[in-house]
């Protein structure tokens, strides 16, 4: 469970084991590492204190052991984790032979056999994203001195959508999104989204949504030709986040129904900088950044664990079965996934930058 | 310009150099390699004889030099290429200092400087996909004996769309798509799509579209946990194809506005096999295959080269410029990209299979 | 600080930080993991209770957190570490600007600057091999069910040498080597070696030596052609062990002065198995295993930290300096490195096996 | 068959196929590529015109197709090959079932089965090193502008040895080595070596030897901590060269019998540069370069193909067999391997430099 060329991330732990965490190898020496900033990102992912989230209550306190000395990275691998404190395995034992629809249970059991630890989703759980958030927060130290800023926000929940203007400054997007637990920059929409999640929960059902991420300040020409394009790297990481089913850049799928004369972004001189009048491309041409903000969206499916009875199979008796998935689940994971999407954007840009995109 | 863990693909050549091609390292020994089958896939990508394509006329004859002996792979790296025969660089010299909107010209020049060979798109050109098609055709030899079959087809061009039933057998999809040069399985829709492309061309404009790909026969549990999920690997390769701006699996972006009770696919026993009653997941749960067909869609932007005047910058004089992109271009590359999408699906599945997904 | 293709090892920690440890990613699910066996290998590396070792007294208790459940690997990454308990940084502060001859201090400071944590060797310390030993002990679980057994032993210390017959059974080599703290299979030679180490220590000096490793039961044909030959993989790992300056297989450097008619190993039928009458090749032809025991030797330089005054430079004042390296050091690290060499042999064979060498 | 992190080398072709060659991916843009220089290195490897080499006469004309335009690298992958012109497969057909002692025939057949192309050694042949020589010659363009110079030379053939002083300037070593076909910098020793090779040939036998390589001008601190030390990278590549059985750096195996007070290299100020008074370390401490010349030696076994009858097995009849290896072989490959060793040194240094060692 690793990714990255210069900044190499390996995730360890599992949903119901003693911990989840990450080792980041290849992190440059001398970069400031502020534990408070990492903890702040972990808190944005945490369910604690959210009305719309699971009742599983884990404070997710960062433990940072290796690779940092005196507040600076040493050049060695950085290891950090968070303990799993509120684990209830009993629910999962009951589901041992009846795979939950929408979960990895069935293919994982076929692949790994009985020794696979699937409790709580095991290594397939969304809880593994704790390591991505830690790694993404570390990458801030590489990006921020270069003026590179990322923000992700909730763009839609179910059928409720807010589409902020492309010119909205990133600090204002960030500030407004953090005013509500939904992560939506528009307060009125956030209220509607929260209501929709509450309604789904009361009906024993769940909702999905779309998260958008924008990254400004990226230098021109970042990305590796062909296979390791900015799109390929971001998408690779985004699709590793459980529940993501689609990724698009700039106009994305909408571009497919436009004409070239509508879609192409004209270049112009903005003082001594080349810029584009529009940003249909999402800041990426030929897989390389143009200097305009990188913009992408990620589709998140509705939470697979729902309180309603569902049809499944019994793998022992080879008969039909019906299950009600117990445990404590989010009726919509979109708000908590916002910081995860932001984190993988940071990771991808930092890795490509260290591979040659920073000049 | 390489990708893959077991099946390692490296692309070489450039649009206006002497050749484009591929080296595939890690290809198992003893696999049948039929040059005719590779040539057939190259022909599906070729513009020759198409009414809707560029007038650049290259027969793209396969030259297969290394790694095959007596019709079987030897276990050594396989090298193959196609000569560039119909190269006209003059057009590009004129555009040297005025980057074309929608192309990699500007970021590539910033990154690589004057030594970058950008003529005809250089290493960023769609012509590099010749190597992907060759590699994907080689992967057939690994997949077909295992009963794994892939088909890609044109799902939409501009606003015209055809959405074949999920139950349509893959051989029939293939056969019907190959009846027309659009690669659409429905003949009536194909006629409309061809007319739309013709209209765009006459107006000096271009069109995009959506390509769908389905892969059947994939064993349960293929894919590597978390980072190298089936979605991550396919998306990584898909976003390396020039002009792709979105990738989605199963219901994709539509899943974001559904409820869990609508989206989850119930399991049932089909004889002694576990299957799902629906396939909203696109045959992938937790990043692993379920045994149902893998289904994904790729959004292709409208061709960036259009015959209309476009605003750009002059990088020498630092003034505004206007260009009309000459050269010979496809008004819509979707039909020729169908086989490329099919090829990267084969590559991703074969690589993940050799990594442990085949049992 | 990572290595491996299927079995991916990342080391974390540093000599004087809170811990040293390892993450092993790609470890197969369902393999027995016995903490006692890992601890036993760590104990073979530990200085505790050795007359010939450093006075730094660390029990090196294994802490195994992730990737194991109910005594079996889960398929997730395995994380384990050992705390650094007996750290005395004061000695190193004094040496901050006067690099120790024979150590990484000078080049590491040039490369990483002041933020590099060089205390006690930092990430360049021999203490990092704790992670290799843990990983090698884990690899036992992959190798032993296949009948693959490795043993390393001390072949020479300074000018004292013992060269066991190639026919000596591996269990007897192992048993005899573990009878003494030198790790030499001949008791009389071990006594002489211990005396030589004691003499060097009293003179404020240090000794090097040669470690030999033999691996039996390796299947025929393990290894990847050309670049990832068995020799390349073992040598890559062996040269990562601090203080290793030479690696040779089979006859090694002696082969350079023999004739082909002396060096070639004739094949013969041993029942229904092909074997070789001699093993000058070290069990490797063309980079692939022959089925005969893999045999290699590693040259270990004398410990760089000696109690005598040494000439060096003062990097602040740009003048000549003289230092006496304090701290607590081994006068000869060969005996403690034996298990490290055995561990990297296991890692290399297990990784190549999982890449295709096991059939 | 690939290696490298930034400079990625993939070898293709085989001994008796149509070609042997290389793709170098990740080569920086704008580097001068002089075909004459590459050809000159290929000529140093060629048997043509040598009294001591095989009678197989191949001019090995470089064909460079991709990645170079107007004498400069373009940033795309560079592909080059050499045709196999003087192939005589008949000899190998006769040996199909009787593996040659000392060759990869037996383990390769076990691993790859009948489809493996073993003719002339197939992908295990020394002929594959043509690609290494091309890649190493390309790396000159990266190294020489930085003042990094490598030279390899023949240090011993059989029992005849010449050990040039460590202070000998590299240009003089190079010039003197190129005066004779043995590649030995001392003319008198070269005459003896040539006589010894002639004698071995007349007796139907073969000789091995030792090649030394020195690299000057390497910046301080090049190398990646722990696993990708300079020693690990050079050794990995060196052991991929067929017939190499040992690699040592600086004092190498001799260091094992020295004391720390003899082996440590004292630092001193040479003007404003830190240097070492001796170079027992081979220019490498803690896996990083010290700024002193990198020095390593490689042991080459005697050629496995000899004209005398040898015992082997018949794999069909499962009986004893005797073979006389026909074909046209070098009685000693050391002289032709000199440039290969020099090439892999360049590759390793260039790759580590591009990974961060160049500053």
Image (cartoon, coloured by chain):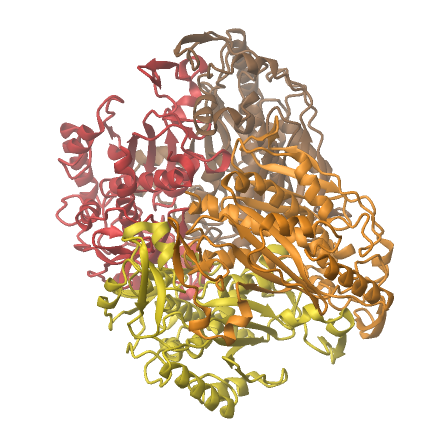
Chain colours: A brown, B red, C orange, D yellow
C329 up-or-down from C70: above or below: below
Residue A309 in the image: above or below residue B190 = above
Report x, y in % for residue D37: 40, 78
Image position of D91 (left or right of D6): left
Percent x, y of residue A82:
68, 31
Which residue is most to the bottom? D188
How many callouts does the rendering have?
0
Quadrant housing the C terminus of chain B:
top left
Residue at 81%, 62% in the rendered image: C96
Q: Is residue B230 above or below residue D203?
A: above
Depth check: C14 or B154 in front? C14
Q: Is residue A354 left or right of residue B137?
A: right
Q: Is residue B92 left or right of residue C179?
A: left
Quadrant for the N terminus of chain B, please. bottom left
Q: Nearer the viewer, residue D146 or D59?
A: D59
| Residue D148 % position (x, y) | 55, 75
| A321 and D30: which is toward the camera | A321
Q: Is residue A55 left or right of residue A276?
A: right
Identified at 49% across, 53% down, the residue is: A220
Would you say residue A287 is visible in this rendering? no
Answer above or below: position of A17 versus A351.
Answer: above
Which corner quadrant of the image does residue A310 belong to?
Answer: top left
- Measured from the top left, where is residue B260 in percent x and y? 45, 15
Q: Is residue A136 visible?
A: yes
């Amino acid at each position: 469970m690793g990714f990255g060329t210069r900044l190499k991330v390996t995730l360890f732990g599992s949903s119901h084991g003693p911990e989840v965490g990450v080792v980041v190898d290849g992190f440059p020496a001398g970069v400031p590492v502020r534990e408070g900033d990492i903890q702040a990102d972990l808190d944005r992912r945490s369910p604690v204190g959210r009305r719309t989230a699971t009742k599983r209550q884990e404070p997710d306190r960062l433990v940072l052991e290796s690779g940092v000395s005196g507040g600076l990275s040493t050049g060695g691998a950085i290891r950090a984790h968070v303990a799993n404190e509120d684990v209830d395995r009993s629910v999962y034992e009951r589901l041992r032979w009846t795979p939950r629809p929408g979960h990895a249970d069935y293919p994982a059991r076929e692949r790994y056999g009985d020794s696979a630890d699937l409790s709580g989703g095991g290594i397939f759980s969304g809880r593994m994203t704790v390591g991505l958030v830690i790694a993404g927060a570390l990458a801030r130290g590489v990006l921020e001195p270069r003026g590179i800023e990322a923000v992700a926000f909730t763009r839609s929940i179910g059928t409720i959508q807010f589409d902020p203007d492309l010119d909205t400054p990133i600090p204002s997007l960030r500030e407004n999104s953090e005013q509500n637990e939904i992560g939506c920059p528009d307060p009125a929409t956030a209220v509607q989204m929260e209501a929709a999640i509450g309604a789904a929960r009361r009906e024993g059902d769940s909702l999905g949504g779309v998260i958008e991420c924008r990254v400004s300040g990226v230098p021109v020409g970042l990305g590796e030709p062909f296979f390791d394009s900015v799109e390929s790297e971001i998408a690779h990481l985004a699709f590793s986040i459980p529940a993501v089913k689609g990724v698009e850049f700039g106009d994305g799928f909408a571009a497919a129904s436009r004409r070239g004369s509508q879609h192409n972004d004209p270049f112009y001189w903005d003082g001594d900088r080349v810029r584009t009048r529009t940003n249909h491309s999402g800041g990426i041409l030929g897989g390389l950044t143009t200097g305009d903000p990188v913009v992408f969206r990620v589709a998140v499916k509705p939470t697979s664990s729902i309180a309603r009875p569902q049809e499944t199979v019994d793998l022992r008796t080879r008969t039909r079965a019906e299950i009600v998935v117990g445990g404590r689940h989010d009726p919509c994971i979109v708000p908590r996934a916002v910081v995860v999407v932001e984190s993988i954007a940071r990771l991808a840009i930092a890795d490509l930058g260290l591979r040659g995109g920073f000049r």
